[in-house]
Image (cartoon, rainbow, N blue to C red):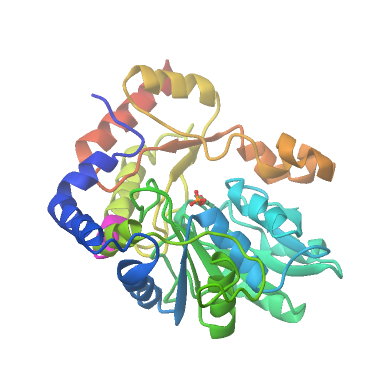
Amino acid sequence: MEIPFVNLKAQYETIKTEVEEAIRKVIARTAFVGGPFAKEFEENFASFCGAKHSVGVGNGTDAIEIALKSLGIGPGDEVITAANSFIATSEAITQAGARVVFCDVEPKTFNIDPDLIEGKITEKTKAIAPVHLYGRPAEMDRINEIAKKHKLLVVEDAAQAHGVKYRGKRAGTLGDMACFSFYPGKNLGAYGDAGVIVTDNEEWAVKARMIADHGRISKYDHEFEGVNSRLDGIQGAVLNVKLKYIDEWNRRRHQNACLYRRCLEDVEEVILPDIPEEGSHVFHLFVVRLKDREKIQLRLKEKGIATGIHYPIALPNLKAYRYLGHQPEDFPVASRYQDEILSLPIFPELIEEQVKYITENLKAALSA
Ligand SMILES: *Cc1c(COP(=O)(O)O)cnc(C)c1O
């Protein structure tokens, strides 16, 4: 059996007619950048989240950078974020002109540890940027409480958490602004790069839209220099089709997580992720922890099973952040987990037989 890490082809087969029709309409109206299809998606996505405004942008990394800039965050400011994420989170903070301040993560959820945030706050701190890593919301009540106390803004990196709920509210409405990526492999993925910023604050939304479009609202009336990062019509149209299915796809991811648990709960060598009730974790990734990871990963590969590591080097330990002068011991949880984590396939189209094949081979690899 060959099991890929994600299977975008299988998903495409299920929505082929709708997607192709949607793309044809965009081409027929030559609504390539922005335009009615991008706008329709922005509106649909904002209401899906339960937020008032959304601004389509070129990708998730730009979404974070533009969101921070629209909040007035830039040179001289500090933004606190999680020590384990994709580099886009911290890169966007730097690109906005601010300084990244890493905070270690909680052992149970692998999300930013609220107990450690206050220790990172200085007079330069302007915002906290929690990441809903792997599809699980960060501890937003605690984070918002800290932010309120210290008058900080909260920008969610929800790139891995489309549709997830935290105390009944969806990601995108859990802070001041939220950023999503629609990179093809995400839970809600476009057919190219795309991203969106979501907020209830109209002023910030207008600012973000201007930044993303050369600092203007109307043609050639540029109020300041911005960037070029816009949602294109084809991506908007594809996302409009796919948005209808996201809850069902997330439900299947959760189902697969539960199936993994049933198959692996007696296997001592594998530490499973916490699996909260359906809806409160959308399992963008299913990350287990184990010893001898490289050996296990290779054995699985020999059996046709693709796996991933998210991420093999915690952000503060990357060469890119040598200038911050951190030691791995400064981030004990993230630094330990980076050598133990292994992501197993969990895309919605993964069937029971495949999960069983993966877990049987994982058990065999562990006892070999
Ligand atoms: C994918 C991702 C991003 C960046 O999104 P792009 O659309 O690829 O720029 C940011 N943060 C996290 C946590 C991600 O997983």
Left or right, 149 with respect to 191, comes to right
Name above or below for residue 323 compared with residue 22: above
Left or right: 40 as drawn, with respect to 103? left
Left or right for 12, reference 4? left
Q: Quadrant of the N terminus?
A: top left
Would you say residue 248 sits in the magenta stretch?
A: yes
Please name the residue shown 39% across and 41% down the image.
265
Determine which quarter of the picture holds residue 246. bottom left
Q: Is residue 175 visible?
A: no
Q: Residue furthest left?
A: 17
Q: Nearer the viewer, residue 90 or 169?
A: 90
The residue nearer to you, when weighing 183 against 114, is: 183
Residue 9 among magenta residues: no
Whether residue 79 sits left or right of residue 351 in the image: it is: right
The secondary structure that dominates the magenta segment is helix
Q: Quadrant of residue 304?
A: top left
Residue drawn 59% across the image and 76% down it: 207
Question: Is residue 206 or residue 264 the one in the foreground?
Answer: 206
Q: Give, as a single range, the part of the protein colored magenta.
A: 242-251
Instruction: Report x, y in % for residue 322.
Output: 79, 38
**Quarter that holds the C terminus:** top left
Whether residue 231 is visible to the viewer of this picture, yes or no, is yes
Residue 248 in the image: x percent, y percent?
25, 60
Residue drawn at 74 percent across, 45 percent down: 331
